[in-house]
Amino acid sequence: MESDGTDPPVDFNTILKSFKNHKFKFASNPAEFKIYPQKFTLRPKGLQRIQLTMFPNQVRETKNQLKCWITDMDGNDVETVASINIRGTVIVPPLRAVKPHINLRECYLQFPYEGEFVIKNPTELPAMYCVILKPTNSLKIESKSFVGVAAPWVETKIPFTVICLHPGDSFAHFDFYAVGHEEKLFELTLEVESIPSKVEASAKNIDFGHVKCLEEKICTVDVLNTSPLNFPFTATLFQDEPSEKGDIWAIQPTSGSLPSQSKVTLEIALVLKEVGWHYANVRVLMNEPLKHTIDIKMKALGVGSPLVFTPVFDKSAVLNFGTMFIKQERFFEYDITNQGVNSRVIEWKHFNDKPPMNKPEVKGQTQSTAKSEPKSDGDKLHIVFCST
């Protein structure tokens, strides 16, 4: 070859790689021809087939010559035996867009959806193309077909996958190029309407009501997922302000997976050590890919007392000292433990029963009704316990 035949040609894979790196220009005089074989020995009455391959890398008219020389043993040219003129015109097929605008509606956040552009090659020549996505922050778009070949006479589909990153309407624009044509041929547009993934709690507020001190009370709340995605989650308890009341909150489960079109039930257990109002919050964090937070407010009113009697002190019970003689001593013992966080002042009071209404009072003297032998019923003494 007189020119363009000595260097390696720019083949298809090199062009595709160049397009992926966003480099659309090649050398001004690329090597577009390949001769095989370049050297051979032609025996008497022999025949040798020479194959000439052209790699059209630019839009231009090609004029060249193929010459064949006889060489000596040292490789020096001795005689020109053939000279073949080569002519050719390299063109870019006029590709056009059949579906230049794609509209995807009601797409959940972080969920992959598929779409496709369609182009048509109305010529008998194949054409290499490249689709370049303009920068966008609201959509994540991927495709293995943004660089490819449009076959002759047929429509070519360019599939892609899109993930919505923000709710609302989003747009993406693509520039469509063909190899050999430095200017873009046309523009493709993608419009997506994204909606938030529907993950919510069955209640935003939980009222435990009246909770007796030192007694556990349990409430439940459901976290509902109506989206098509499975979401990993973590559940934690926190208080807006540090509490010094010693209340104990616990939640189960603390982590797991929230299946699509399903729910997870959270169980919150509460033990109070002081009376009064108690407040806390549940935070359910949806991890990747949703990154969504649900806060649930809780309150409880502590009632009763954090004092523990050992043995158990039944307020309705009667301390029966049984049959006793005068000046005989008997006693009941109780251990009192304060499991609250505040100190308490304890006071015991006692008082006698009022005299029976059918017994007249005798002024100026005291009359004993006790007999020499003890009665089985005995006298009643009321003891009142007060704590402050």
Image (tube, rainbow, N blue to C red):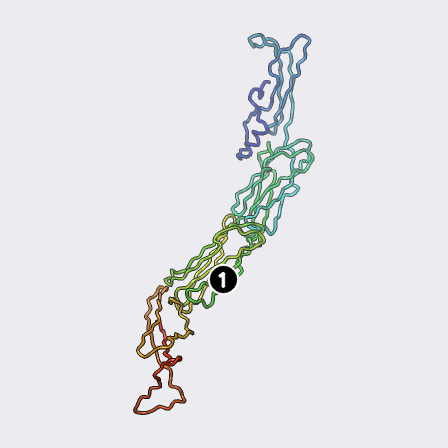
Residue 349: image location, x then y, percent = 34, 76
Image height check: is 99 above or below 195?
Answer: above
Query: In the rendered view, would you say 216 is above or below 366?
Result: above
The three-letter amino acid code for the residue at tag 1 is Cys
Q: Nearer the viewer, residue 185 or 344?
A: 344
Q: Quadrant of the N terminus?
A: top right
Mark 1 Cα-neighbour bin, 10 Å: few <14, some 14–19, many ≥20: few
User: Which quadrant would residue 215 be assigned to in this image?
Assistant: bottom left
Name the residue located 57 percent from the left edge and 30 percent from the top edge. 15
Mark 1 element type: strand
Above or below 178: residue 327: below
- Residue occupied by mark 1: 219
Residue farthest along the bottom direction in this orientation:
363
**Left or right, residue 363 beside residue 62:** left
Image-quadrant location for residue 97: top right
Which of the pair 248/259 is nearer the observer? 248
Could you tell whether 172 is left or right of 277 in the image?
right
Lateral position of residue 364 relative to residue 36, left or right = left
Q: Residue 322, image x and y in percent?
A: 38, 76
Q: Where residue 287 sits: x, y (%)?
A: 49, 50
Is 218 or 266 nearer to us in this picture? Answer: 218
Q: How many marks?
A: 1
Which quarter of the rendering shows the C terminus?
bottom left
Q: Is residue 19 above or below residue 325?
A: above
Instruction: Compare residues 188 and 111 and report the one nearer the observer.
Output: 111
Q: Quadrant of residue 324?
A: bottom left
Q: Residue at x 56, y 39 (%)?
A: 132
Q: Residue at position x 59%, y 24% from top?
A: 32
Q: Position of residue 335 (x, y in %)?
A: 35, 67
Q: Residue at x 39, y 60 (%)?
A: 241
